[in-house]
Amino acid sequence: MKLIGRRLIQMILILIVASIILFIIFDSDTFKMRIALAELGNFGVSAMDPDDYKAWLVKKGLDIPFYQRFALWVGNVLQGDLGWSFEKNTAVGPLLWAALKNTGILAFWVFALMVPLSLILGVLAGMREGSRLDRSISFISVFTTSIPEIATAIILTVIFALGLKWLPTKSAMISGFDGWQLMLPVMTLVLYDFGYVARMTRASMAEVMTSQYIRTAVLKGLPYRRVILRHALRNALIAPFTVIVLQLNWLLSGVVVVEVFFEYKGFGKLLLEAALFGDIYVVQACTLVAVIVAVTSQIISDIGYTFLNPRIRFA
Amino acid sequence: MNRREFVRIAALTGLAAGTAYAMAGLADPVMAAETGNLPFPADEADAQSGGILKVAMQIQKMEDPATYSWVEMSNQTRHLLEYLAMTGPDNITRPMLAESWSASDDLKTWTFNIRKGVMWHNGDELTAEHIKWNVERWTDPAIGSSNVGLSSISALVEEVDSGEKDDKGNAKMVKKLRDGAITLVDSHTIQFNLSKPVLSFPEDMYNYPTAILHPSFTPPFSDNPIGTGAYGLAELAVGDKCILKRITKTTDGKDFTYWGGKVYLDEIHYYNFDEDNQLTAFAGGDVDAIYEFSIEQMELAKAVEGNIIAARTAQTLCCRMRVTEPPFDDIRVRKAIVMACDNAAIKALVYPEGGDIGENHHVAPVHPEYFELPPIKRDVEGAKALLKEAGKENLEVTIDVGNTDGPWHQSVAEAMRDQLKDAGITLNVNVMPASNYWEIWAKTGFGATAWTHRPLGTMVLSLGYRTGVPWNESAFASAEFDAALDAAEATLDVEERRAKMETVEKILQDAAVMVQPLYRPVYTITSKKVHGYPAHPTQYHQFNKVWMSA
Amino acid sequence: MADITIEPAAPSILAQLTRTRIIALLMALVWLPLSAYVISGVTPGGSADYMLLPSIPAVILLYLIAFRAWRESWVAVLGLSLVCFWLLVAVSVPFLPLFDPNKPIAPFQIPFATKGENFYLLGTDYKGRDILSRTLWGCQRVIVWGVTATLVAYMVGMLFGLLAGYLSGWWDEIISFLGNVLLSFPVMVLFIVILNYLGPSGFNIIVAVTFASAPAIMRIVRGLALDIKTRDYVFAAQTRGESPLWIMFVELLPNVRGPIIVDACLRLGYTTVAITTLTFLGLGLQPPDPDWGLMIRESAKTAMLFKFSYMLIVPALSVSSLILGFNLMADGLREMSLRD
Amino acid sequence: MTEQIPVLECRNLCISYFTRAGEIPAVVDFNMRLMPGEAQGIVGESGCGKSTVALAIMNYMGKNGKVVSGEILFEGRDMQKMSEEELRQLRGSRIAMVYQEPMASLNPAMLVGDQLAEVPIYHEGVSKEEAWNRARDMLAKVKLPEPERILNSYPHQISGGQQQRVVIAMALLSGPKLLLLDEPTTALDVTVEASIVDLIREIADESGTSMIYISHNLGLILETCDRITVMYSGEAVELGDVDAVFDMMRHPYTRGLFGSIPLPGADKNARPLVSIPGQLPLPHERPRGCNFGPRCDFFKAGVCDAAAIRMRQVRGSGPGHWSRCERIDDIDWDKPIAEGVSREITAPGDVVLKVDNMTKHYEIEESALFFSGEKKTVKANENIDFDAREAETVAIVGESGCGKSTFAKVLMGLETATSGNVQLGNFELGHLPVQKRSADTISKLQMVFQNPFDTLNPSHTVGSQIARVIRKFGVESDPVKVQERVLDLLDTVKLPRDFAKRRPRQLSGGQKQRVGIARAFAGNPSVVIADEPVSALDVSVQAAVTELLMDIQAEHGTTMLFISHDLSVVRYLADRIVVMYLGQIMEQGTTDEIFSPPYHPYTEALLSAVPIADTHVKKRRIVLEGELPSATNPPEGCPFSTRCRYMIPGTCDVTPPPLKQMSAGHRILCHLTDDELNAMEPVIVIEGAPSEKKEVRRKRKSVAQGAGSKAKTQPAAKRAAKPKAASPVKTTAKDKPSRSK
């Protein structure tokens, strides 16, 4: 539990450092100008004289030095107020929750498909290292992992949406939730990610299968099923478990390109748009979420690792 | 004077459009005459009521219509808030909330007759008082409306000492409405007394931030949207969607009747899509129409089932040279650059579909007072000779490009680079982010600046080329030009004005201030179900007569 | 991606290979002209093209050498072949009979189309630029920026990894904490924030990749350094009174190299993905010079149609094959190192 | 006896591994008959195929190992012909195995109880409860304290010794007919090893289970087995009754092996060890004919390399004594092995190194950026007090965790002493970290490291590593002279000069150790610390390296601190011995003083624990109880009090013991009175007649005490990977056989 405490304190430190850096970055004139441009239009900005611009900054609250804004922001966040989006002209909170909800749906399906698929394939491959099945599975997983998400997205879109016309091209879901529109993004992410987890599972399983305690179990005269299910799996799944949990963190990166490509209104799209706009409070909130997810997944993976691994649990 | 011009003048002088068309002997298939002085197209015989029009556009916020900065914003409220005048897809401005208008001979007094029986969404009737309230509001320094910059409104204000001092201790001046600038003649007649002649008063009244608000308005508009249009705001989520629905009841419970005749659509839905993605959203069947697609997407658009609509505009790119910066202070250098460029070739390369060739004087063929000068010819040898004369052989210059209106700016600059090479001129294309470009646009020696569409050519020239005006990015200064432009602007009659424009255009063209290769078209696409979709040069959405077939 | 665990044992095949000075020389012969060529942004067609000429035999020689060393692992050989193919393309593309990659000729020509006397093997894009030419030229930018960024990330990551691992104590605490801060950001968030701040360009991609990759590299190197520093030869060096710098760079660094090579192959793949993705998102390399991510970006808004999907598929497959090459190489090398 | 069916019989067994490089024969023509109740030892160096035999018996060869010909009969049935299911039923029930690494052999994620209970559940179908009960009983039988607690523990929660007992219990649970023990004690500390060996012997006596005991340690085989098979390079070279083989070796390799281990009679100056020249051939590079031929003194071309050599019965010995020597009848076996060249005794000179009350404490805390955990003090060294004279060899002996390495670090300046002094000559360096020492001081104190695989940087050539030392210490700076000196040093350590250009990877373990020695002596040191320099090497190589080290020492008159856990080696080469336990010196004195009474109780136990491969040696059996305490939490009073059989409650566990001066240099740290100490009997007695041995063994057994002793961690010496003959070597080294192809 001390570990968790450490992690939490580390997380808070990271959050503070990260958000100060973000405030400094977004304090730059370029970003303020970018907000002005988006808000007032090209000619609007060019028509402004420095005084007008200053007045505009005052109106937007952007004239305040970043450290004061940071302090204010921290205060507000602690009270549950994530700030105001310049771009979307709304409170950041609901905006973020809506995006997170969408990404959550996406992530749920990705995990629901990817975890069983990669674990089963990984275990099958690792069980008999070097067999034809193993080599096929390994090659397939290297192959799919090698195709970047953007390419997977393109290939799937070309095949299923443009070619066969089975699935919609985009996933903007403008008329409410639509399962069909979810399929391409989910497929893309699963296809890209499962290979990685399957390979980790395979490596872990293969390592366990060559371990001496498996030899002990076999030479104890246990049936093969028992050796695999009771002795090998438990140990072989420790590493994949942590990898899977850490995929949560990866997913936050991975969804950006998929969401942008498919126009899916999730966390990644929100983040990219906000960053390009210079929408500091949205970027801050997204970073907050990202870091919390990252650290939480690390904590979960630590706890899970400890829980699954008696060597650490009872150290 | 051709017939089209006549209609325009008629409108300018306050004649009802229908009448004007009739006088010009036009069949008037587009404009309604019989429905009595309405600015909208005629009702189509087979038009069907009902349906939802889904449009892909960037969804902006709806704060204060007087300070709108994006066309998209105004489109979101265009069917709620209406204007005194309305410029149609044909670039002709007709009375809208005004029934008619008239100007004095010196163009210093404009009288507007406000349409009777126009009902606000809260049940009130529109009066001249409301118009006065709006105009006063535009001129209120506290509001900060860009309308003050319109030549019409600026002629209503004066600069006064605000009583405050700026940093340097100079008196801080603010613009305030002049006393007596607005006179209410009666409940439905309003008169504007200008300090200088203004030709474009009606056109200004359809500038997108000049929407007429109810005096009860407090920003943001989306919180209490009261307008005179046929639609009301049902839902707004910035960056997501904007849903408009037909108004049937006023806020005080009465039946709402719309002054503008029949409208067909039940609802108008705007969905947020980036410009790049609007066409793919359309192709995917998510929406029925889009705000705009770029020339790069033309082939994709052609492959999608739908009606492609190309609007002719005065939107352009001025690759202007600042005449005070070396080497452009030498007119031979500027001339050589202009001569070495082939505008027609650039246009054909960059905008093969639609659009007009630019003639380096910033008056577009769509402008009513456009005077057709002899076509300009590329003259590489002449350019070389000029450079030799100026001692600037192997000239190397850099053009700043911000792609503020899309990547085609860069394509233009690159095409110029290739052409200038023939004349021995090295052109470096310095691409920078749009926001950076707007910081230097008025200062750089050689820059590619996008100019938007304005209904009259004189409007643009006044803004950008008069001596010392703020937007004079080229630092062009010519008393001769200013005088010629004054003369043109004081002429209400288009034919006469056109004649005067010859001098104006010629002076500017000969000064070789800019390479202006083209006027770009604006493309949009609608599904086959959509009928009567307007091809407006400034992408103003006028959906009153749009209908959907089942 | 999360870290990949690397077997700490130095694979002898790798060690044997990297030892050869010739290989280092050949690599330099390929790398220096190519990166100079791309980074300086010289206009193709000039005399600068000729500086790539010696790189062509160097690539072929490298391929043959590596092929001989790795021939027992078909996985590694396949990966090597893919990577060397693109490398060969990168150095020889100025000499190939291709259209100017930036010159609009005839838009929307589908593959195998013939228009006038021009034949378009892979068709043309929306501006009428030859896709084959753009794809082949594009690999130059992807490879050069990808590898350079990875190299810089490695230099930084290894330096800090050695400092943290060897010096331990406060050095380790501080470096590891900073590493954790950076690692806590999802990679894409980090990329977006950095590139958004610095502005999109190749050099800034190097900075962003360094920020994103160096912490992970640092961790690996730190782990290796922690392991290696318990070895007796380090102990011997310490008892000989060698300075920490000498120990880090002479005793530790060469031995970190082995496991790092496998990781480097994987990371080259990640960096390539990152560059392509960032360019697709508009944060990476800038138009008009060809680049795979850019080709995807441009085509995704202009050619989302089955009949024009070649514009998307060609760069997508190109980038995938390069990454596949890197990954297969890593896989093969790891397999070989485990076998020995 | 003749009517009995052997429990296991291997007939002409050939086993090969199939790799990409082709077929690699691992075991060739192996024969063995194991009768019920018999204990068979298989001994040999690494790579000789002994473990392959064990795994072949279990029919667990991995995917590329295969029995090529011959058969393995278990109770008369050919195991090759059994189905998977039949095999499964045999494994763990009729045949059981105990492995080298107990920790790795137990599933880390399962309770010990579950792992034990599986055996009866799956072989006898008993209920889970019944299975647990049996497991509990069995744990008690292998003398584990608190069986209930252990059943409910995970493997990592119990000590290495206990783990091995659990593995043994698991093997015994279903009363196997055959027990395979594959180096069961190699990973354990000496005193723990002794107790496990004791247990194994007891089980064998009680249950009548047949055993195959695989080990590289001849002494262990002697202590546990009835019969022995000596293997070399995939072949059994000699087999027979233990006594017969030990007393009447009839194969040159067996003789060589015995010649290279320091037995109590050996003396470093008068009768140095004789190493076997050359090294083990790689499996795919075996010579024609006799595998040992190239290394054999009796090699005769045309005879030994003509054809594969058969096993021959040894005449004049017991019926089961066979040897694979073509010239068995030509060799005069009674003639002693060629003696090593004796050295002149160099008399110890002045005190070179003086350690005065040196104490080293570590503070460990849970390091974190923001949390400071509790600080714990580890007393790594406590009042170390001894000196070493010029040309003298001082051995520091102790088990893992005794503080040997910390002591070395302080000497070398990687740590500074907490208190006390270390003086090199007149120069105080206990508080001087290495960075602050002058090159001269540093060069005077050099070290030879334990692990040959770690001692050289794999990235640099041998020559450059030696040259660096020469330059660093300012011996030479001119490149040509440096190079000369490097070559000289290579000559000194008897390595070919062209080794200078090689990389460590191309060297065998013994060669690397030689380079390590060359490097240590490059700066003309006055003191060399040798930290278990040979423990990771194969027996036959050990002798050569040890001899080399001592030759150079004698030549240079260098003082040597020899750190070791192996008392036999220490006895052979040390002038004086320092025995350490938990950071403190328990006893120090000359070699003779240490090896004869009075003893410190710990020394006594340590002496008894060392297996000696000599039938003439009689040992008193003392088995230590309890576990090695943790250095972070040492017992109050005497550190050894928790395990001492002389422990005086109320004194030893409370008061730190006094230092007793037994004679001039002989000091013992103990509460026992001088009388009590003097009354101790010698642990090791060398006897004349080999025939008494059997009785000796019986007697020993009755003395044997089982106890749950614990090794905290495995000894450092064993951590190192065993030298692999498989490293790609292309050498023309002296200790490499010149092969006829």
Image (cartoon, rainbow, N blue to C red):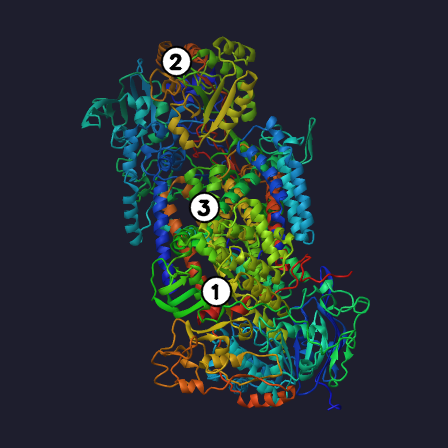
User: Mark 3 highlights which residue?
Assistant: C211
Residue C213 locus on image (x, y percent): 48, 48
Badge 2 element: loop
Residue B74 position, x and y percent, is 38, 34
Whole-Å distance between the Cαs marked 1 and 2?
122 Å
- Asked which secondary structure carries label 3, the reply is helix
Tell me which residue sits at (68%, 48%) in the image: C67
Q: Which label was assigned to residue B493?
A: 2
Q: Residue at x 45, y 76 (%)?
A: D628
B222 vs D393: above or below: above
Q: Mark 1 = which residue?
A: D390
Q: CA distance from mark 1 to mark 3?
A: 57 Å
Between D390 and A178, the residue placed more toward the observer is D390
The reply to whether discs 1 and 3 touch (Cβ–Cβ < 8 Å) is no
Q: On screen, D296 above or below C123?
A: below
The one of D336 and D681 positioned closer to us in this rendering: D336
